[in-house]
Every structure is written in C-alpha cells, then in structure tokens.
Amino acid sequence: MNPGVKIFPTATAARAGASMEGEEEEVETREEHDSGTARLVLPEDGYEWRKYGQKYIQNIRKWRSYFRCQKQNCMAKKRVEWSTSGEADDVRVVYDGMHNHSQGPSNRKQYDLLSQVLRDQSTSSSSSSSSFPLS
DNA sequence: GGGATTTGACCACCA
DNA sequence: GTGGTGGTCAAATCC
Ligand SMILES: [Zn+2]
C-alpha cells in the first residue's frame, strides 16, 4: 500500500530482547490496585477495538490513541485523548463512523456514559466525552 | 500460527 | 514553496 520506498532504519539492529521497560505510559484501563491514584476508567462500549496508532497532539498537549473497530463491515473508529501531566485524568473518547453490526449484548455502562455526555458536554471534570459527527 | 499491540516513519492537508 | 500537525500504515514483538 505504500508505494515508493521502504526505508528500514531498524533493519539489523535492536534485538537483545531484554529489558525494554523503564518508563512506559500506557493507557492502563482499569484500576490498578488499592492505591487511590490510578483511576483511569476506559469507556468500554462493548465493542472490540484494535489500536493502530498513538501520537501526542501538540495542539492540546495531550496524548491521542487511535482505535479501529475489528469488524470488516464496520468502519467505526475510536479516538481516545488523555493528558499525562500531574494527575488530571482527562479521558476524552471520540467515536467516528457507525457500526454495521448490532451491538452484541446490552451494556449498562454505556447508558451511564451517555447520560454523562448528555449532562455536560465539555466541563472540566474527569469524564469522557463522546461525539459522532458524520455518518 | 494467529492475533494483538507497539513504535517509527510517511503522507496529506493547511498556514 | 516550506513548515507543521494530524492521521494512517507497516514491520516487529509479545502472548
Ligand atoms: Zn463495529
């Protein structure tokens, strides 16, 4: 899909396969343990998403993760934004596109989320905002 | 082996 | 015409 050239910087290098940790800032969904600090509630809509990218947006100074629906006929995309400074857990979830398949089982969590979204759209209160612009 | 996830790089669009 | 951002893909890695 990528015509042109295929540069390969990491061709014969990087291997060792040992020690790769140190400082990783992954989107830990779920509360870690009883620590009273890790409270990142990833909005689980009940669908399966496959992460295909993660980048830092300078515009808002926040990290953005890109997810795509796993269904073939489904062109739905999910975009998750979160900040890493301090402890302000501001998780913003933006859904793009629509699903071609029915939403398996019912999810009461989504209802709760929808309620919140409808309640306040952009308030500074650790929450998730969802938006579905075009079809 | 398959599937999922990660990181980096390239590309397209806009100022 | 160049620079920059945002967005996507591709390869590699891990389970
Ligand atoms: Zn879907």
Image: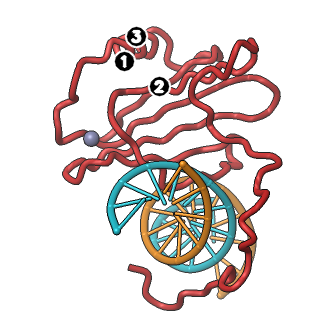
Chain colours: A red, B cyan, C orange
Q: Is residue A100 above or below residue A3?
A: above
Q: Nearer the viewer, residue A124 or A38?
A: A38
Q: Amino acid at mark 3?
A: Asp
Provide the residue designation for mark 2. A43
Percent of width and height locating residue A5? 53, 91
Q: Are marks 3 and 1 in contact (CB under 8 Å)?
A: yes
* Crowding at mark 2 (Cα within 10 Å: few <14, some 14-19, many 20+): some
The verdict on label 1 being within 8 Å of ligand 1 is: no
Tags 2 and 1 both on a single chain:
yes
Q: Which mark is residue A16?
A: none
Please state if A100 lies on the left or on the right of A117 as rendered.
Answer: left
- Secondary structure, mark 3, is helix
Percent of width and height locating residue A117? 44, 16
* Crowding at mark 3 (Cα within 10 Å: few <14, some 14-19, many 20+): few
Q: Earlier in the sequence, mark 2 or mark 3?
A: 2
Q: Label 2: chain?
A: A
Provide the residue designation for mark 1. A110
Q: Is residue A59 above or below residue A119?
A: below
Q: Amino acid at mark 1?
A: Gln
Q: CA distance from mark 2 to mark 3?
A: 10 Å
Q: Are marks 2 and 3 in contact (CB under 8 Å)?
A: no
Query: Considering the image in quadrants, where does the N terminus of chain A appear?
Result: bottom left
Q: Nearer the viewer, residue A9 or A59?
A: A9
Percent of width and height locating residue A121? 49, 18
Q: CA distance from mark 3 to mark 1?
A: 5 Å
Please state if A3 lies on the left or on the right of A70 as rendered.
Answer: right
